[in-house]
Image (tube, helix red, strand yellow):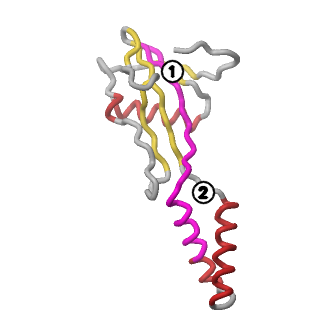
């Protein structure tokens, strides 16, 4: 593990029950593929790429990676303006219903090439303690939920 330089926000949990060896491979991280309708995905990755999760005797180091696709409102607005201009030139001013359809079309076009935002949370679990490199309640809840799923 690397040396931390500066302040760190860490949350500590007491581990009540721990299997002999947690099965992190049950919930691996899989990236969001272009054109997919999936907007969020999370899973475990090893602390270092290609390494084992177990970093010592009864000690595991892992990262929780969360990807989320969010469409930029400005990009949608600009694309809708382009589509409205084309529609106005071809047929005339679009009705509100047509505008709604054009907005839906713009969102679908932009989802074909998503740019997911990634968040990685580093964690270390010992026999009786779990250290999570975050204090955000949403992230802590996700870490706890996924750890419960693997045992």
Of helix, strand and loop, which one carries label 2? loop
Q: Between residues 48 and 7, which one lies in front from this camera angle?
A: 48
The one nearer the camera, 132 or 68, is 68
Q: Which residue is drawn at 47% across and 16% down?
A: 129
Q: Give the range drawn in magenta.
A: 102-131
**Nearer mark to the viewer, of 1 and 2:** 2
Instruction: Determine the residue positioned at 53% across, 54% down.
Output: 114
Of callouts 1 and 2, the N-terminal one: 1
Does residue 5 show up? yes
Is 138 situated left or right of 124 in this image? right
Quadrant in which residue 140 is drawn: top right
The image shows residue 100, relative to residue 55, as above or below, that is: below
- The x and y percentages for residue 145 are 44, 35
The quadrant of the rendering that contains the C terminus is top left
Residue 128 inside the magenta-drawn segment: yes
Q: Which residue lies at the image location 61% right of the left edge and 29% below the top edge?
A: 135
Residue most extreme to the top? 57
Q: Tag 1's secondary structure?
A: strand
Mark 2 is surrounded, within 10 Å at the Cα level, by few (under 14), some (14 to 19) or many (20 or more) other residues, namely some
Query: With 32 as the anchor, is 21 left or right in this view?
Result: left
Measure how far apart labels 1 and 2 are at the Cα level.
35 Å
Residue 150 rendering spot, x and y as whole percentages: 34, 31
Q: Where is residue 85 in the image (x, y as percent from the top left)?
A: 69, 80
Q: In which quarter of the image is residue 82?
A: bottom right
- Which mark is drawn over residue 13? 1
**Residue drawn at x 63%, y 88% as measured from the top left:** 90
Q: Residue placed farthest to the left in the image?
A: 20
Q: Which mark is residue 71?
A: 2
């Amino acid at each position: 593990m690397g040396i931390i330089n500066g302040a760190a926000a860490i949350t500590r949990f007491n581990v009540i029950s721990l299997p002999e060896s947690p099965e992190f491979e049950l919930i691996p991280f899989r990236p969001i593929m272009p054109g997919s309708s999936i907007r969020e995905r999370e899973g475990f990755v090893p602390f270092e790429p290609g390494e084992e999760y177990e970093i010592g005797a009864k000690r595991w180091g892992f990262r929780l990676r969360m990807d989320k696709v969010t469409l930029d409102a400005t990009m949608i607005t600009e694309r809708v303006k382009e589509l409205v201009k084309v529609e106005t030139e071809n047929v005339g001013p679009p009705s509100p219903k047509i505008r709604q359809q054009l907005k839906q079309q713009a969102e679908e076009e932009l989802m074909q090439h998503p740019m997911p935002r990634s968040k990685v949370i580093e964690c270390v679990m010992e026999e009786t303690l779990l250290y999570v490199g975050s204090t955000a309640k949403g992230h802590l809840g996700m870490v706890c939920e996924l750890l419960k799923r693997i045992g």
